[in-house]
Amino acid sequence: MLLGDFSASHKFKTRPIAPQDWAKALAQLRAPLGVHAVLGNHDWWDDLAAQRKRAGPVHGRRVLEKSGIPVYENAVVRLAKDGQHFWLAGLGDQLAFIGRAGWRSQGVDDLAGTLAQVTDAAPVILLVHEPDIFPRVPARVALTLSGHTHGGQVRLFGYSPMVPSRFGNRFAYGHIVEEDRHLIVSGGLGCSFLPVRMGVPPEIVLVDVAV
């Protein structure tokens, strides 16, 4: 599962990587049930044409799909593993459009519309970029997977002084359980805004899910 921010729109980087190049690298990934993706805010923010039009699809989505990786924006797919069916749902980004004149960023997320596409009682795994949606995720969803925060990038004794979330450290990193609902926030790779990581090593998370 690829949870977004394939582009890095901050200026503190050695060089930009063209979308067709990182998409070509990701196309080499293999998984028994396929590779699936959602987009992050930087994938939207890096596409200046999409920002002007206030509409997608962004270039990152087009190159991923051209490489054979489906991108879910408020969409679902029904999958099966060892005879057990489940739903994979992907939410549109919650910060897609940069705010104007003091307004907050606007998203393209539609949680209710996404889950309305689930047509049976099979478990649901929800892919989101920003974890801030989690308080609105119903118990119907068995597991929510998220990125975005980089674990705060600087984390000391389980605390991050700055987290790109309106909930602060509540959803900064790791496995969070609230009211029997499960959220996993990956520390991910790379950096956002500042090229600093301390106490949050880059990671690729392996999640074991049991029926």
Image (tube, rainbow, N blue to C red):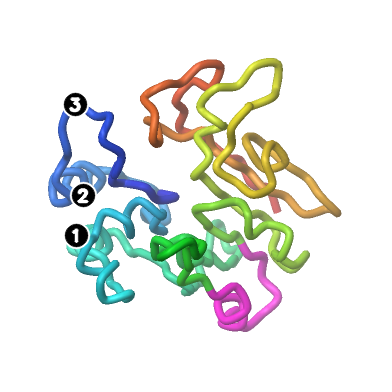
Which numbered disc flags the more N-terminal residue, 2 or 1? 2
**Quadrant of the drawing holding the C terminus:** bottom right
Q: Residues within 10 Å of mark 2 (few under 14, many from 20)?
A: many
Tag in front: 2 or 3 = 3
Residue range corresponding to the magenta coloring: 110-124
Q: Name the residue under label 3.
A: 14
Tag 2: amino acid: Ala
| The quarter of the displayed image where residue 122 is located | bottom right
SS at mark 1 in the image: helix
State the image coordinates of residue 135 (x, y, percent, origin top left): 73, 59
Q: Mark 2 points at which residue?
A: 23
Q: Is residue 115 magenta?
A: yes
Q: Is residue 92 above or below residue 117?
A: above
For the residues bearing labels 2 and 1, Cβ distance under 8 angstroms: yes
Q: Mark 1 points at which residue?
A: 63
Q: Can residue 164 be seen in this view?
A: yes
Q: Residues within 10 Å of mark 3 (few under 14, many from 20)?
A: few
- Disc 2 to disc 3, C-alpha distance: 19 Å
SS at mark 3 in the image: loop
Q: Is residue 102 above or below residue 29?
A: below
Is 105 left or right of 112, judged from the image as shown?
Answer: left
Tag 1: amino acid: Val
Q: Residues within 10 Å of mark 1 (few under 14, many from 20)?
A: some
- Which of the labelled discs sits on residue 131, or is there none? none
The residue under the point 60% across, 21% down is 155
The residue under the point 29% across, 44% down is 9
